[in-house]
Image: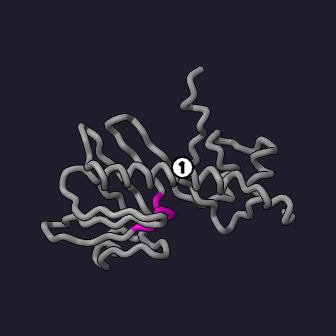
Amino acid sequence: MTDDDNFLRYDKMVEAALRGVVRQALEEVVQHNLKGEHHFYITFMTDYPGVRIPDYLRDRYPGEMTIVLQYQFTDLRVDRDKMEVTLSFNNVPERLVVPLSAISIFADPSVNFALQFQPLSESIEDDELLSELADGDDPDGSGGGKKAKSEKKGEVVSLDQFRKK
């Protein structure tokens, strides 16, 4: 890709906007607490730069970890780039710091809402992936191109499946 091709990176704009939804939801909880049946499942990459969790949790969850914000969490803080929260593990309070960019799944099951973030693997160049998708090379319909080239966890969720027909 040339610099002109990289000028309008819509993929990065959309991801930033969706991560803004996560940030805003967490900010609402900071200001107003969780109401009704709302609760969050937050899955994040434990080896992502800036993630701060106790070593025993990193050892137990070497790739990804899911936390639940529902009844027993304290001191939730959110800023532009990260969330911080204290959760209890075996009755021991632990402070977790999670950059918003480390989050791979954010869900509020009470309203059937979920976002899944799929960062591009460094082994696949952006232009290569985009050309695969443009060529219709999507054998499993996931939006992820050729599976043989991708060793990503999870799947890309197409927004079309949520639109009313």
Q: Give the range drawn in magenta.
A: 98-103
Which is more toward the observer, 123 or 85?
Answer: 85
Say what secondary structure mark 1 lies in.
helix
Residue 161: percent from left, percent from top: 57, 32
- Residue sitting at x 28%, y 53%: 69
Which is more toward the observer, 121 or 75?
Answer: 75
Residue 160 sits above or below residue 156 on the image: above
Horizontal side, residue 61 vs residue 136: left or right: left
- Residue sitting at x 19%, y 65%: 88
**Which quadrant is home to the C terminus?**
top right
The stretch drawn in magenta includes residue 100:
yes
**Which quadrant is home to the N terminus?**
bottom right
Residue 129: percent from left, percent from top: 74, 55
Residue 47: percent from left, percent from top: 45, 73
Q: Is residue 45 visible?
A: no
Q: Which amino acid does label 1 sit on?
A: Leu
The stretch drawn in magenta includes residue 101:
yes
Q: Residues within 10 Å of mark 1 (few under 14, many from 20)?
A: some
Q: Which residue lies furthest to the bottom in this view?
A: 55
Horizontal side, residue 2 vs residue 65: left or right: right
The residue wearing badge 1 is: 18
How is the rendered protein coloured?
A: one colour
